[in-house]
Image (spheres, rainbow, N blue to C red):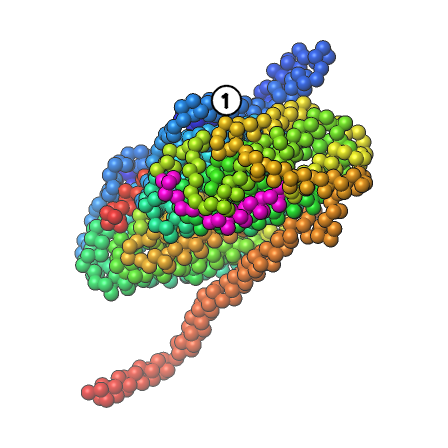
C-alpha cells in the first residue's frame, strides 16, 4: 500500500528529470516510429481525433514522458484511495531517519482517508492538465521544460499531501513554490511576466519562512517532526507554543493559499500559461495551505485564538476578492480573484470548526475551478485574447466549452445541484452553529485521522463572533459570487460577437478534459449526502439560495437592459478601485519594496564609504606613519649618534628620578 | 599514510612546474594543462580512496600519521581526518580537479600580460597543498603553517592572472588588500593559538579538544577565543571584517574565485569548529552571542548589499558573506544541530558558489563584462543552457529545499531556535527571525538577478554578437557540482550522518 503511494510520488519526480534532460532526445528516437503510425492512419479513412493523436503523441517525447507517469500515478492513487475507502486506517512507512544533531526527521509517508482523496484529486487534475497542455502548448519551443516542471510540481504536491513528516512536507511545499515561479515565468521574454513570477515566489516565501518557524515551534514542543507524534502530543503542549506555532503556520497558509494580506501575487500569476493557472493556481497548490491546516487541525482546535485569526483573514479575503473579481476585465483575473475568495471559504470553514466541510469544498473547488480555467483556455485560444471585452456570443461557436463552463459557473455560484452548492452550504451551516452555540462539535468521521480521536472532546470552543463574522461575510460573498459568475457567463457566451474572425471549438485534446471535469463538478456534491455532517440543512440552503438569486438577478436585470454592454457598470465609480484589488500593490510598494531598495542602496554606500574606508584608511594611516618615521632614517650618522646620546640621557634621567 | 601522500602529490606537482621543458609556446601550455590535470586527478583519487577506507562507525580522527617534527617545542607532524574534515578534504580535491578541467581549455593566453601557464598550474597545486593540509592537520602550529601557505599562491593568482587585460592595476590592489588583511587576521590567530598552547602545555588538537578547556582559566579562554575568532572571522569573512572579499573575488580569475569561495572561506569556519569552540568552550560561551549578532548582521547586510549590486561577480561575493553568516550563526548556537548546520552549509556553499563563480566566469568571458546593466536581459534566448545553469545555481544558492543550500540554512535556524543551555534564548530567537528575513532577501536578490539578465528581450547591443552556449569542458567541470548539489539536497543523510558523530565528540557528548 504505502509502496504504491511512494511510487506514485516518485513517478512524476523521475519524469521531471527525464523529461527535462532527455525529452527532445526521445522525440528524435521516436520519429521513425511515428512516421510509420502516421502512414497507417493518414489515408483519411479515420479523420479527427485519432489522426491528431497519431500526429502529435508518438513523436512527442516530452509529452509521453509527461503524460504516462502521471497517468500511472493516477491509477496508483486511485487504488490507494479505494483500499483506504474499504479499510480505513492510517498507513505509514518510513524510508529513512535523518540525524540532525537534535531532533531527527524522517523521510516517511503517512496515508489516511483525507490524504488519499486529495492525492487522487491532485493526480486527476494534473493528468487532465498534462493532456490538455499537449495541444495547448504544441507550438511552444520550450514545451519540454514546461511539461517537466508540471511533473515536478505534481511530485512535490503529492509529497505535501502524503508526507508523514513536517520537514519533508516543507520540502515539497517549497519545491511547489519554485515550480510555480518557473511556470508563471514561462513566457519570460515579457518583462511583466518575469515580474509576476518573482513576485509570486517572494510573497509566498515570506509566508513560508513563518511556516518553517511554525514547524520548529510545534516540532520542538513535541520533540518530533513526525506529524502523528506531533498531533498526539498536542494536548500536553504549552498553550503559548500551540498558539505561536499555529499562528506561524497561518503565515504559510496566507502565502500559499493567497489569503489576505499575502494574496497579491495570485492575480499577477495569471501571466503564466492557462493550464498552469488551472493546475497550480486554482486546483492544487493554492489548496495546499488549507490542506495542511486541515491535516494539523487538532493543533488548531487547541488554539482557538489562531482559528479566530484564520476567521478574520478568511472573511476579509472572501468578500474583498469576490468584489475585486466582479470588476476585472481579464477573464483569467476574474477566476484568480474568485480562487482567493473560494479558498477563503475553506479557511472560514476551518475557522468555524468544520474540517470536513472545508475539505469537501476543496475537492469540489478543485474540480470546478480546474474546469473553468481549462475552459477559459479554450476561449482564449479561440478568441486570441484574455479580455472579456473581446468575447461574447460564443455559445453557438463553442457548445462543449459553453455547457461545461455553465456547469462550472453554476458550481462556483452555488446553484443546486452543482457541487459548489452542497460544499458551500456545509460551511455556512457550520458557521451558523458556531455563531449560536459555541462549543466543540465532534467532527471526525469520513476523513477520520486516527490521532484526532484522542483529543476531540477536549477541544476548546470556537469564539462565537468568529462564527458570525464568517456567516455574514459568507452570505454576502454568495451574492457577489453569483453576480460575477453570472456577469462573466453572460458577457462571454451571450450577446453580440465582439471578436473578429470565426471562433471555433478547441481541439479534442483540449475539449475533452474540460468536458470530463464537468462530471465531478456537477455530481461531487451528492457524495456529501451520505454523511451527517455534509448534508445540506434546509434553512441555510434557502437563505443562501436567496442570496444567489439576488446577486445573479441584479446582474441579469442590468445586462438585460442592453446585452451589448458589460453589466459591470453596475459598480459605478468604485470600479477602478476594485479592479486594482483595492490598490494594495501600491501600498506594499510604498511600505515595503521602496524602503528595502533604499536600504540596499544605503548599505552599498556604507560599505564603500565607512566599512571599507576604515580599512583603506588604516592602510594609508600606517603608510603615513611610516613616512613620518622614515624622516628619522635619513642616512646621517651624526643624527643617529645624537639620537643614541639623547636616549642615554633620557634613560639616566629616568633611573635617577624613579629611584 | 594516505593523508601524507595526498599532500606530497600536489606538492611534487608544484615543484615540477619549476623545471621548464623546451618547446613552442602552445606545446608548453598543453603540457602544463596535462600536468595539472594529472596531479590533481591523482590527489582526487587519493581523497576518494581515503573516503572509501574511512571507518564510518568510529567518531575520532582516523588514517592518522604522527611523527615528531621539532621535539624541543613539542611540535609534531600530526595528520588525521574525522567526519568533520573528510567532506571538506573531498570537496577540496574535487574542486581543484574541476578547476584544472576548466583551466585545461580557458587558460589565459600568455600574451594578455599574465604569467606562463605552468606557473598558474604550479600555484594552484601549491594552493591545494595548503588547503588539504589545513583540513587534515591535528597540530596547532602545523595547522597554522598550512593556513598561511594558502595565502601566497592565492596572492599571485589574483595579482597576475586577475583583472581584465589592460587593467591589472586593480587586480594588484585587490591582491594586496587580500594578503595584508588576512595576514593581519593570522597575526591574531597565531597569538591566540600560542596562548592556548602555552597554557595547556600541548599543541595536539585532539588532546586539547578532548579536555574541553579543562586546565585553562576563564580569562585565558576568553582572550584565546577572542583572538582566534578574529583570525578566523577575517578568513570567513564575518561582517565587518569582510571588505577584502568583494575586491578579491571581482578581480580574481575564474579558478581563483572558485577556490577562494569554494574552499578558502571554509578554512575560517572550519577553524571555528575545530579549534575555537571545542578547545576554549568557556570563552566560546561568553562570546557566542556576539558572534551570532555579527553573523545575523552579515546575513542581512550581505543580502541588502547584493540587492543593489551592479556587478555579477561582486554580487556573488556579497552573497557569500550572507551564506557564511548562516554558517557562523550555526556555530554560534554551540549545539550539535548548529554545528552540523555549519558543516553542511560549508559543503553546500562550496559546491553552489563554486558553480556560481564558474558560470559567472563563463558569462564574463563571453560578454566581456560583468556589469548587470550592460549585460541587459534575454540570456535565456541568447545562451539557453548557460542561462539555465545560472538559474539552477541561483535557485540552489537561495536555499531551495531539495537542493544542498537549504539544509545548512534550515538547521542553523533550527539551532538558533534552541541554542545551547547557557546562552540567552530570547536573543537567539531574534537572530532566527532576522535570519529568516535574510533568507527572503536572499531569494529577492537572486530572483532579481535572474530576472535582470536571463529574462526579458535580448539587449540591443548583443543581438548581433554571436558566442557559443555551454561548451564541453565547461559542462564537464560543472556537471559534478550540479549532481552533488542535487544529491546532497535530496539525501542530506549522507552528510549529516558523517558529521554528527564527530561533532558530538567535539562538543563533549551532548
Q: Nearer the viewer, residue A527 or B371?
A: A527
Q: Is residue A64 left or right of residue A434?
A: right
Picture residue at 28% right of the left edge, 34% below the top: B53
Is A459 inside the magenta-drawn segment? yes
Q: Nearer the viewer, residue B450 or B120?
A: B450
Picture residue at 54% right of the left edge, 49% below the top: A469
Q: Main secondary structure of the magenta part?
A: helix
Q: Quadrant of residue A487?
A: top right
- The answer to whether residue A329 is seen in the rendering is yes
Quadrant for the N terminus of chain A, please. top left
**Chain letter of the residue beneath label 1 in the structure image:** A
- The answer to whether residue A257 is seen in the rendering is no
Picture residue at 36% right of the left edge, 43% below the top: A458
Q: Is residue A392 left or right of residue A409?
A: right
Q: Nearer the viewer, residue A72 or A557?
A: A557
The tally of labels here is: 1
Q: Quadrant of residue A537?
A: top right
Q: Position of residue B283 (x, y in %)?
A: 28, 60
* Residue topped by disc 1: A75
Q: Position of residue A213 (x, y in %)?
A: 42, 48
Q: Position of residue A407 (x, y in %)?
A: 65, 30
B220 to A183, vertically: above or below:
below
Picture residue at 32% right of the left edge, 45% below the top: A236
- SS at badge 1: helix
Q: Position of residue A100 (x, y in %)?
A: 34, 43
Quadrant for the C terminus of chain A, please. bottom left
Is A323 inside the magenta-drawn segment? no
Q: Nearer the viewer, residue A65 or B72?
A: A65
Per the rendered image, the range of residues in magenta is A455-478
Q: Is residue B171 left or right of residue A622?
A: right
Amino acid at each position: 500500500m504505502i509502496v504504491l503511494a511512494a511510487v506514485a510520488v516518485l513517478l512524476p519526480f523521475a519524469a521531471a528529470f527525464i523529461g527535462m534532460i532527455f525529452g527532445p532526445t526521445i522525440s528524435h528516437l521516436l520519429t521513425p516510429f511515428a512516421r510509420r503510425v502516421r502512414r497507417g492512419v493518414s489515408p483519411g479513412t479515420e479523420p479527427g481525433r485519432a489522426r491528431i493523436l497519431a500526429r502529435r503523441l508518438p513523436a512527442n517525447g516530452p509529452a509521453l514522458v509527461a503524460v504516462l507517469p502521471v497517468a500511472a500515478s493516477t491509477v496508483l492513487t486511485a487504488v490507494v484511495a479505494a483500499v483506504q475507502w474499504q479499510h480505513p486506517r492510517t498507513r505509514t512507512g518510513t524510508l529513512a531517519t535523518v540525524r540532525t544533531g537534535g531532533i531527527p526527521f524522517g523521510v516517511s509517508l503517512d496515508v489516511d482517508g483525507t490524504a488519499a482523496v486529495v492525492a487522487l484529486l491532485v493526480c486527476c487534475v494534473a493528468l487532465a492538465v498534462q493532456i490538455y497542455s499537449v495541444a495547448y502548448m504544441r507550438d511552444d519551443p520550450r514545451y519540454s521544460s514546461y511539461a517537466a516542471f508540471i511533473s515536478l510540481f505534481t511530485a512535490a504536491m503529492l509529497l505535501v499531501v502524503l508526507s508523514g513528516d513536517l520537514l519533508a512536507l516543507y520540502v515539497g511545499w517549497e519545491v511547489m513554490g519554485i515550480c510555480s515561479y518557473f511556470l508563471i515565468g514561462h513566457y519570460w521574454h515579457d518583462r511583466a511576466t518575469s515580474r509576476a513570477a518573482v513576485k509570486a515566489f517572494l510573497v509566498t516565501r515570506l509566508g513560508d519562512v513563518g511556516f518553517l518557524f511554525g514547524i520548529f515551534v510545534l516540532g520542538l514542543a513535541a520533540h518530533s517532526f513526525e506529524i502523528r507524534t506531533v498531533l498526539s502530543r498536542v494536548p500536553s503542549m504549552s498553550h503559548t507554543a500551540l498558539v505561536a506555532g499555529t499562528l506561524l503556520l497561518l503565515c504559510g497558509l496566507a502565502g500559499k493559499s493567497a489569503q489576505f494580506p499575502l494574496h497579491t501575487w495570485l492575480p499577477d500569476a495569471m501571466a503564466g500559461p492557462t493550464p498552469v493557472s488551472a493546475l497550480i493556481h486554482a486546483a492544487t497548490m493554492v489548496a495546499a495551505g488549507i490542506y495542511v491546516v486541515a491535516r494539523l487541525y487538532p493543533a488548531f482546535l487547541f488554539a482557538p485564538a489562531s482559528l479566530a485569526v484564520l476567521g478574520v483573514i478568511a472573511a476579509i479575503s472572501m468578500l474583498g476578492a469576490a468584489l475585486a473579481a466582479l470588476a476585472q476585465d481579464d477573464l483569467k483575473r476574474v477566476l484568480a480573484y474568485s480562487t482567493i475568495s473560494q479558498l477563503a471559504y475553506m479557511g472560514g470553514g476551518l475557522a468555524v470548526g468544520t474540517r470536513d466541510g472545508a475539505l469537501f469544498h476543496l475537492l469540489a473547488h478543485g474540480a470546478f475551478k480546474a474546469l473553468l480555467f481549462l475552459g477559459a483556455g479554450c476561449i482564449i485560444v479561440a478568441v486570441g485574447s484574455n479580455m472579456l471585452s473581446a468575447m461574447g456570443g460564443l455559445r453557438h461557436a463553442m457548445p462543449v466549452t459553453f455547457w461545461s463552463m455553465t456547469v462550472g459557473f453554476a458550481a462556483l455560484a452555488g446553484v443546486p445541484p452543482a457541487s459548489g452548492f452542497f460544499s458551500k452550504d456545509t460551511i455556512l451551516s457550520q458557521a451558523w452553529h458556531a455563531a449560536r452555540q459555541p462549543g466543540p462539535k465532534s467532527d471526525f468521521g469520513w476523513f477520520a485521522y486516527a490521532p484526532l480521536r484522542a483529543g476531540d472532546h477536549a477541544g476548546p470552543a470556537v469564539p462565537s463572533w468568529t462564527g458570525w463574522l464568517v456567516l455574514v461575510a459568507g452570505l454576502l460573498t454568495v451574492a457577489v459570487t453569483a453576480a460575477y459568475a453570472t456577469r462573466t457567463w453572460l458577457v462571454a457566451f451571450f450577446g453580440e460577437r465582439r471578436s473578429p474572425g470565426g471562433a471555433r471549438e478547441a481541439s479534442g485534446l483540449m475539449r475533452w478534459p474540460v468536458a470530463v471535469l464537468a462530471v465531478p463538478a456537477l455530481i461531487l456534491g451528492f457524495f456529501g449526502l451520505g454523511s451527517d455532517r455534509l448534508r445540506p440543512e434546509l434553512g441555510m440552503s434557502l437563505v443562501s439560495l436567496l442570496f444567489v438569486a439576488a446577486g445573479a438577478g441584479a446582474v441579469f436585470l442590468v445586462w438585460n437592459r442592453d446585452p451589448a454592454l458589460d453589466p459591470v457598470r453596475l459598480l459605478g465609480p468604485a470600479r477602478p478601485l476594485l479592479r486594482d484589488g483595492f490598490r494594495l500593490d501600491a501600498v506594499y510598494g510604498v511600505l515595503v519594496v521602496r524602503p528595502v531598495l533604499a536600504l540596499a542602496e544605503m548599505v552599498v554606500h556604507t560599505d564603500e564609504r565607512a566599512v571599507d574606508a576604515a580599512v583603506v584608511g588604516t592602510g594609508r594611516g600606517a603608510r603615513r606613519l611610516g613616512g613620518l618615521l622614515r624622516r628619522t632614517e635619513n642616512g646621517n650618522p651624526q643624527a643617529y649618534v645624537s639620537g643614541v646620546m639623547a636616549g642615554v640621557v633620557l634613560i639616566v634621567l629616568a633611573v635617577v628620578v624613579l629611584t | 599514510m594516505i593523508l601524507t601522500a595526498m599532500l606530497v602529490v600536489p606538492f611534487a606537482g608544484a615543484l615540477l612546474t619549476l623545471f621548464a621543458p623546451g618547446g613552442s609556446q602552445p606545446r608548453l601550455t598543453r603540457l602544463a594543462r596535462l600536468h595539472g590535470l594529472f596531479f590533481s586527478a591523482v590527489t582526487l583519487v587519493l581523497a576518494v580512496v581515503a573516503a572509501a577506507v574511512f571507518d564510518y562507525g568510529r567518531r575520532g580522527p582516523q588514517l592518522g600519521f604522527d611523527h615528531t617534527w621539532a621535539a624541543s617545542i613539542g611540535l609534531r607532524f600530526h595528520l588525521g581526518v574525522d567526519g568533520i574534515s573528510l567532506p571538506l578534504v573531498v570537496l577540496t580535491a574535487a574542486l581543484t580537479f574541476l578547476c584544472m578541467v576548466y583551466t585545461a581549455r580557458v587558460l589565459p593566453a600568455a600574451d594578455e600580460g599574465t604569467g606562463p601557464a605552468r606557473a598558474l598550474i604550479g600555484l594552484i597545486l601549491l594552493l591545494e597543498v595548503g588547503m588539504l593540509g589545513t583540513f587534515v592537520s591535528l597540530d596547532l602550529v602545523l595547522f597554522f603553517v598550512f593556513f598561511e601557505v594558502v595565502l601566497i599562491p592565492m596572492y599571485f593568482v589574483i595579482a597576475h592572472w586577475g583583472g581584465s587585460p589592460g587593467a591589472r592595476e586593480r587586480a594588484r590592489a585587490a591582491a594586496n588588500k587580500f594578503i595584508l588583511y588576512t595576514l593581519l587576521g593570522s597575526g591574531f590567530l597565531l597569538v591566540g593559538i600560542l596562548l592556548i598552547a602555552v597554557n595547556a602545555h600541548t599543541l595536539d588538537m585532539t588532546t586539547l579538544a578532548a579536555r574541553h578547556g579543562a586546565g585553562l582559566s576563564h580569562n585565558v579562554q576568553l582572550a584565546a577565543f577572542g583572538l582566534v575568532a578574529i583570525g578566523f572571522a577575517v578568513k570567513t569573512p564575518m561582517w565587518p571584517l569582510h571588505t577584502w572579499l568583494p575586491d578579491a573575488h571581482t578581480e580574481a580569475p575564474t579558478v581563483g574565485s572558485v577556490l577562494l569561495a569554494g574552499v578558502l572561506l571554509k578554512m575560517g569556519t572550519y577553524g571555528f569548529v575545530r579549534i575555537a569552540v571545542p578547545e576554549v568552550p568557556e570563552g566560546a560561551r561568553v562570546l557566542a552571542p556576539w558572534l551570532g549578532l555579527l553573523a545575523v548582521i552579515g546575513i542581512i547586510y550581505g543580502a541588502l548589499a547584493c540587492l543593489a549590486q551592479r556587478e555579477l561577480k561582486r554580487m556573488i561575493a556579497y552573497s557569500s558573506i550572507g551564506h557564511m553568516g548562516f554558517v557562523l550563526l550555526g556555530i554560534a548556537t554551540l549545539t550539535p544541530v548548529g554545528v552540523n548546520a555549519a558543516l553542511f552549509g560549508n559543503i553546500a556553499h562550496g559546491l553552489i558558489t563554486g558553480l556560481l563563480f564558474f558560470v559567472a566566469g563563463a558569462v564574463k568571458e563571453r560578454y566581456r563584462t560583468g556589469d548587470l546593466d550592460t549585460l541587459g536581459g534575454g540570456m535565456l534566448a541568447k545562451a539557453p543552457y548557460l542561462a539555465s545553469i545560472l538559474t539552477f545555481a541561483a535557485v540552489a544558492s537561495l536555499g531551495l529545499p531539495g537542493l544542498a543550500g537549504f539544509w545548512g540554512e534550515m538547521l542553523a535556524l533550527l539551532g538558533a531556535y534552541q541554542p545551547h543551555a547557557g546562552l540567552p534564548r530570547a536573543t537567539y530567537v531574534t537572530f532566527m527571525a532576522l535570519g529568516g528575513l535574510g533568507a527572503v532577501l536572499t531569494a529577492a536578490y537572486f530572483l532579481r538577478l535572474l530576472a535582470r539578465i536571463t529574462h526579458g528581450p535580448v539587449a540591443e547591443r548583443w543581438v548581433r554578437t554571436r558566442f557559443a552556449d555551454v561548451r564541453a569542458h565547461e559542462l564537464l567541470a560543472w556537471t559534478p557540482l550540479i549532481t552533488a548539489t542535487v544529491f546532497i539536497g535530496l539525501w542530506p543523510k549522507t552528510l549529516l550522518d558523517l558529521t554528527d558523530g564527530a561533532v558530538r565528540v567535539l562538543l563533549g557528548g551532548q
